[in-house]
Image (cartoon, rainbow, N blue to C red):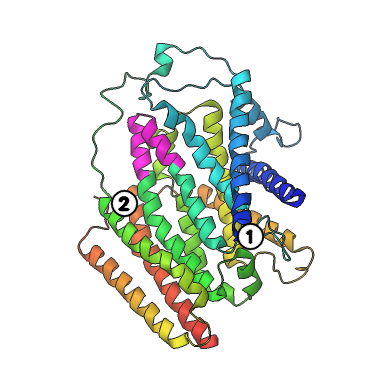
């Protein structure tokens, strides 16, 4: 357990270093840069004409079905990793291989069904 | 403690130098592939200091945050895009016998998870800019992440199955030459999906500069924009590093793979980075629907087939 916290302590330390690199760069930038805001400069860019309506316009999210598929598949995929380390250990062999094909079968059928329903094409 | 500080300093140095080398290589390689010279003046010798000059320029530029933008998210986004790639560098081994900053047990899993976070920076930028181009770009980034993350995870899982471990150093130690043909499909899927996740050409529909004006980055300028650019090149280094370690045997080579193993890692990383640049010069941008189709109709089934092949051969051989 000691080791576990030590390991992720290094990750946290590097996270702090990374934040420091970005913050340090921006701090130097603050010392060097001019700051002369004008109304035109702060308008939203729309190829030189005045922006029409709001930036957060209503739009149709065309891939929400991908999002469902992604969540379903990704949750399955996470379980692959712990399984991958033990599946060929002595005494597992054929059983786990069979299970893998059941797993792949489920995913393939799901994918084929989604494809057949036409949700995998961007409309 | 001192050792940890030394290793972190090495990681930070690699993070500062390698992306710049890739960026400079891109300037020159693209230029020569297109029959021109590229930068020639900065630093006197073949424009070697061009990126340093760019950095000096970026550091002096005004920091403009559009009045309509969501200020805090807008300002935070470049950091979220950049820092994850630094964290992934921590777990990529360059040589045998602990030549890695941190030999993490679930290394593959950590690398993939943290790499995905980098994309969130671009999504944040797209949303917070309150700009129509940015919003479109941000949505495309999201769609691309969701489509390509899956084949990437599957092909990485295939290597983990073959090696029987999730540690990146452990995977390279298990690696044998016949993994090259065995994991070929997985490797190709991983590299292509990684390129798509980094939004590199030909998968740069979300940032298509000639169509939606750099998408999520439309409103960015100065140093914050430079941080996004740096994130792109750091992403290339990380992707090439992971592909090297997972699929190309990392520090193992046909000869001299003892004490000079780290040199093999670097050679492979830069060869892959060269390929990344080559793709950019060679292929036109994929349309959004073609992009999605490639992921769901080709890469996901191919990576599932690779999983089946890995499983069968592993049990048959073991």
- The CA distance from mark 1 to mark 2 is 47 Å
User: Is residue A83 or residue B234 the one in the foreground?
Assistant: A83
* Residue named by callout 1: A3
- Measuring from the top left, give residue A59's x and y in whole percent: 24, 38
Circle 2 — which element?
helix
* Residue named by callout 2: B289
**A117 above or below B82?**
below
The residue under the point 52% across, 66% down is B187
Q: Nearer the viewer, mark 1 or mark 2?
A: 1
User: Is residue A22 or residue B48 the one in the foreground?
Assistant: A22
**Is residue B313 visible from the viewing direction of this image?**
yes
Q: Chain of mark 1?
A: A
Residue B98 placement, left or right of A30:
right
If the image is split into quadrants, where does the C terminus of chain B sit?
bottom right
Q: Chain of mark 2?
A: B
- Measuring from the top left, give residue A106's x and y in whole percent: 30, 73
Residue B134 placement, left or right of A36:
left
**B222 above or below B87?**
above
Q: Main secondary structure of the magenta part?
A: helix
Residues packed near mark 2 inside 10 Å, few (<14), some (14 to 19) or many (20 plus) = few
* Residue B109 sits inside the magenta stretch: no
Q: How many marks?
A: 2
In the image, the segment drawn in magenta is B121-140
- Measuring from the top left, give residue B227's x and y in whole percent: 55, 35
Residues packed near mark 1 inside 10 Å, few (<14), some (14 to 19) or many (20 plus) = few
**Is residue B215 visible from the viewing direction of this image?**
no
- Measuring from the top left, give residue B59's x and y in whole percent: 61, 25
The residue under the point 72% across, 72% down is B254
């Amino acid at each position: 357990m000691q080791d576990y916290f030590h390991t992720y302590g290094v990750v946290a330390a590097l996270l702090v270093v990374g934040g420091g690199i970005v913050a340090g760069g921006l701090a130097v930038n603050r010392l060097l840069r001019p700051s002369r805001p004008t109304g035109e400069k702060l308008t939203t860019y729309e190829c030189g004409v005045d922006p029409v309506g709001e930036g957060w316009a209503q739009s149709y999210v065309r891939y929400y079905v991908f999002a469902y598929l992604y969540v379903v598949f990704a949750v399955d995929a996470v379980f692959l990793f712990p399984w991958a380390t033990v599946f060929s250990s002595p005494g597992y062999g054929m059983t786990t291989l069979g299970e893998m094909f059941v797993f792949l079968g489920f995913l393939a059928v799901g994918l084929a069904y989604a494809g057949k329903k036409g949700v995998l094409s961007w409309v | 403690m001192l050792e940890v500080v030394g290793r972190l300093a090495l990681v930070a140095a690699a993070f500062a130098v390698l992306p710049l080398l890739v960026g400079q290589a891109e300037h020159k390689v693209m230029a020569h592939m297109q029959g021109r010279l590229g930068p020639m003046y900065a630093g006197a010798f073949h424009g070697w200091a061009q990126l340093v000059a760019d950095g000096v320029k970026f550091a002096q530029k005004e920091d403009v945050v559009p009045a309509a933008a969501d200020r805090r998210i807008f300002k935070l986004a470049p950091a979220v895009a950049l820092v994850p790639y630094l964290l992934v560098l921590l777990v990529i081994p360059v040589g045998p016998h602990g030549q890695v900053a941190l030999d993490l047990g679930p290394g593959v899993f950590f690398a993939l998870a943290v790499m995905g976070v980098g994309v969130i920076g671009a999504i944040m930028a797209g949303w917070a800019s309150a700009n129509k181009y940015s919003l479109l770009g941000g949505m495309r980034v999201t769609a691309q992440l969701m489509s390509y993350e899956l084949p990437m995870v599957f092909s990485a899982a295939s290597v983990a199955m073959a090696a029987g471990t999730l540690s990146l150093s452990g995977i390279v130690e298990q690696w044998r030459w016949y993994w090259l043909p065995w994991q070929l499909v997985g490797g190709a899927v991983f590299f292509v999906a990684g390129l798509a996740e980094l939004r590199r050409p030909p998968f740069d529909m979300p940032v298509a500069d000639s169509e939606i004006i750099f998408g999520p980055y439309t409103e960015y300028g100065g140093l914050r924009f430079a941080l996004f650019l740096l994130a792109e090149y750091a992403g290339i280094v990380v992707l090439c590093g992971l592909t090297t370690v997972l699929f190309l045997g990392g520090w193992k080579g046909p000869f001299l793979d003892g004490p000079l193993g780290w040199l093999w890692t670097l050679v492979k990383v830069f060869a892959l980075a060269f390929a990344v640049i080559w793709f950019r010069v060679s292929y036109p941008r994929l349309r959004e629907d073609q992009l999605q189709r490639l992921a769901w109709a080709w890469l996901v089934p191919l990576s599932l087939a690779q999983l089946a092949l890995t499983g069968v051969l592993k049990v048959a051989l073991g």
